[in-house]
Image (spheres, rainbow, N blue to C red):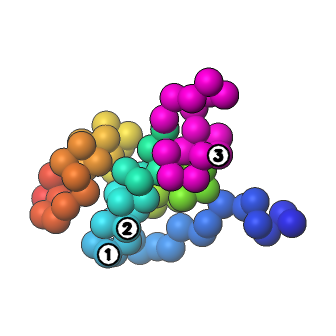
Amino acid sequence: MTAVLDDFPVLTPVTDEDLTTAARAVMTHAPESWPEGELCRSERVPHPCRLARWGRATLRAAGLTEERADELITAGGTYPWPWA
């Protein structure tokens, strides 16, 4: 059961495809307010869910700060990257 709950591995080096997927994961698995608290918009589990954590970890592994990751997500996660 532990393997089911573990975070997904972050592969390095991080490719452009990984960045696109990570940005989409973070946008899709965003927090949403519910009476029970902050839940993942996609999975309705406590936020951050596994995919949201993986997405943020992948963006960090690529060298993005939290602020730059937020800019990427706000820009829609599209290429060319805002930091390019």
Q: What element carries label 3?
A: loop
- Residue at coordinates 29% horizontally, 48% vertically from top-left? 73
Residue 37 sits inside the magenta stretch: yes
**Residue 33 on image: x %, y %:** 51, 29
Q: Is residue 23 left or right of residue 3?
A: left
Q: Earlier in the sequence, mark 1 or mark 3?
A: 1
Q: In this view, does 58 lie to the left or right of 15?
A: right
**Residue 78 on image: x %, y %:** 19, 61
- Under mark 2, the amino acid is Thr
Q: Is mark 2 on a helix, strand or loop?
A: helix
Q: Residue furthest top?
A: 35
Q: What element carries label 1?
A: helix
**Residue 72 on image: x %, y %:** 25, 49
Q: In this view, does 81 lie to the left or right of 39?
A: left
Q: Residue 45 carries which label?
A: 3
- Under mark 1, the amino acid is Glu
Q: How far apart are marks 1 and 3 (CA)?
A: 26 Å
Quadrant location of the C terminus? bottom left
Query: Where does label 1 land, which residue?
Result: 17
Q: Which residue lies furthest to the front in this view?
A: 35
Q: Are marks 2 and 1 in contact (CB under 8 Å)?
A: yes
Residue 33 in sight: yes
Q: Which mark is residue 21?
A: 2
**Residue 66 on image: x %, y %:** 38, 40
Q: Which of 84 and 34 is in front in this view?
A: 34
